Image (cartoon, grey):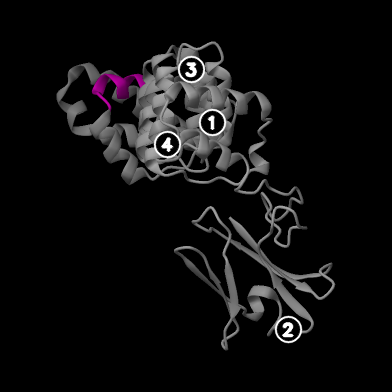
Amino acid sequence: MLTVRLCSEDKHAVIGKTKFLWPEQCLPNEITVDENQTVILRGIGNIARIPLRQAFFSVASIQPTKRSLYIGTLEDSVPSVSVYASLSSLQRTELFNSLVVKISNCLAQEDLNNIWNELLKLAKKANVDPSSHLPIALPTHIQMVLLKVLRKCINEKFFDRVLTFLIHSRLISDSKACCKLVELLASKSLIQQAIDFLRFSLVVDDGTYTAFLKMSSNESVLESSNLLLALLEKPVSSLGLRLTVSQELTETEVMTLIERLILLGCDSKRDDLFDKILKLMAVLVDSHSQRFVWDEKCHNVIRDAACFAATMVFLIS
């Protein structure tokens, strides 16, 4: 995420600013303003065009002698671009060429033991606050290397520490890598790390969400409830999730999840949770509806789900 500020000549007064996603690790290396009052940012392989409309920066035009557009920074200079975790926060984020580059360089090695040792050093030194780090998507093959290292070193003494460090750094984001990570977490019943991953992830796609549902269905009731609560806080696409669930989860797993969602709804005192439970339950029922009709073992669960849904709708309407 880049934040662009239009400043007064003394750099103290911010006339306006905007933010947008920039897909490269490096900041734009060329900045121009064309005749249409459009700021053009050029990077290694991308171009961003920012119209300087009055509604955008609250000014109609740029007067070069009085106003300047500042983007970018050098490591040994006063930063001329402000990149914040949010526009309401003044805490400066860490630049790309620090933690992320260190981890990327570490993963570029061939020896998995060396990679593990370097990751352990970073984990011991780092005090990762996700609000002060820009998230970045590592290339898929690099993320898969990371998963390979974690699988190899899963029994190491400081595995939990390294895993927590990587989760908080939000470097695992590729759909395939996320699903592999969930499989790893499920193999060791690492519920707290799974919950942390959900909380720190900016986006959870349908495949990853379904993988966590599968993990939840195979845990104890208590652990499953904690994981489901974390899942319910993430937005989902009903259509996409329904299709993925129908392909990846068995009837038994879906029935288990429905039963536990009912228990969660009965025990919960949060009104906002009821709606989320009903929506997820609807996805689960729809995903296997035809199979449920022909399987008598599922009929009682479907009746319970219908009764629960009717009661909840009555209570919250």
Q: Tell me the distance, in whole angstroms, between the alpha carbons under discs 2 and 4.
A: 44 Å
* Circle 2: residue type: Pro
| Extreme residue toward the left, this view | 294
Earlier-in-chain disc, 3 versus 4: 4
Query: According to the image, label 1 marks what residue?
Result: 167
**How packed is label 2: few (under 14 Cα within 10 Å), some, or many (20 or more)?**
few
Is 221 situated above or below 289? above
Q: Where is residue 233 in the image (x, y as percent from the top left)?
A: 52, 36
Magenta-drawn stretch contains 257: yes
Query: According to the image, label 3 marks what residue?
Result: 190
Earlier-in-chain disc, 4 versus 1: 4
* Circle 3: residue type: Leu
Q: Tell me the distance, in whole angstroms, between the alpha carbons under discs 1 and 3.
A: 12 Å
Is 301 situated above or below 105? above
Question: Number of marks in the image?
Answer: 4
Query: According to the image, label 2 marks what residue?
Result: 64
In contact (CB < 8 Å): disc 2 and disc 1: no
Looking at the rendering, the stretch of residues picked out in magenta corresponds to: 249-258
Q: Tell me the distance, in whole angstroms, between the alpha carbons under discs 4 and 1.
A: 12 Å
Residue name at image x 51 percent, y 65 percent: 43
Residue name at image x 57 percent, y 66 percent: 29
35 lies left or right of 79: left
Query: According to the image, label 4 marks what residue?
Result: 143
Q: Is residue 75 visible?
A: yes
